[in-house]
Each structure stands twice: as C-alpha cells, then as structure tokens.
C-alpha cells in the first residue's frame, strides 16, 4: 500500500439549512490533523485529505481512516490530538467517536 494510513475528512458543503460537515468545521479539521501530525514528528507515510459526503451527514463532522475503514462522527477540533495519538499513531480505535 502506498500510504500506511489514509484519512478522509468530509468537507461537503450543501445549501443551508441541511446539516453537513463542510459548514461545521471540516476544513478546519483537515488543517488541525495536518498540524497535529507534523507536531507528532512521526515519519509514517500517511495522507490526510478532504472528501465528499461520507453518507453520515446527521453525525457530522465525519471522517474515515483506512486501511481499517473506521468512521468517526461528531469530530470536534478538541478530538484531533486523541485520534492522532490513539489511532493514527497507536492503531487503537477511539471507540467513543466511532460510527457506522
Ligand atoms: S455532508 Fe459530511 S457525511 Fe454527508
């Protein structure tokens, strides 16, 4: 596999008043994950990028981590360090945020 982990964060932005991840803080999450990853100093090859709708709009902001295929919902900026340390580095699912 090209990347050890591949993180897709929904930044889909629908017209109001539909709930969607982009209008919450999807783009902010991408930057926060990239910053947190850089701060960790970890050299594993991972990719963090935006995605379209992951089909869990009511539980947004959402994201999915591969190769595990683990979906997280209602992800807040305060959760970024926990997901980074526990899952992206430690390979342990953050079960309190898992959906799907
Ligand atoms: S808008 Fe993000 S899951 Fe649908």
Image (cartoon, rainbow, N blue to C red):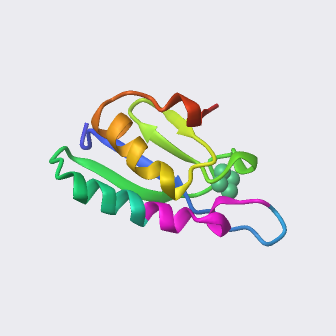
| Ligand 1 quadrant in view | bottom right
Q: Up-down: is 25 above or below 61?
A: below
| Front-most of residues 99 and 82 | 82
Q: Residue furthest bottom?
A: 15
Task: Locate residue 79 relative to residue 23 in the image: left or right.
Answer: left
Q: Up-down: is 71 above or below 13?
A: above
What residue is drawn where x is 48% and y is 32%? 94
What residue is drawn where x is 41% and y is 43%? 82
Q: Give coordinates of residue 3: x percent, y percent.
A: 26, 43
What residue is drawn where x is 19% and y is 44%? 44
Main SS of residues in magenta? helix
**Residue 73, image quadrant:** top right
Q: In which quarter of the image is the N terminus?
A: top left
Q: Quadrant of the C terminus?
A: top right
Q: Up-down: is 92 above or below 80?
A: above
Q: Give coordinates of residue 26: x percent, y percent.
A: 56, 62
**Magenta span:** 19-30
| Front-most of residues 33 and 16 | 33
Task: Locate residue 41 relative to residue 96 in the image: left or right.
Answer: left
What residue is drawn where x is 28% and y is 38%? 89
């Amino acid at each position: 596999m090209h990347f050890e982990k591949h993180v897709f964060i929904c930044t889909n932005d629908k017209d109001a008043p539909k709930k969607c991840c982009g209008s919450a803080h999807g783009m902010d999450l991408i930057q926060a994950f990239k910053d947190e990853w850089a701060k960790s100093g970890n050299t594993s090859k991972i990719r963090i990028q935006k995605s379209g709708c992951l089909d869990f709009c009511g539980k947004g902001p959402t994201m999915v981590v591969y190769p595990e295929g683990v979906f997280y919902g209602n992800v807040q900026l305060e959760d970024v360090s926990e997901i980074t340390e526990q899952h992206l580095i430690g390979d342990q699912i953050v079960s309190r945020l898992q959906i799907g």
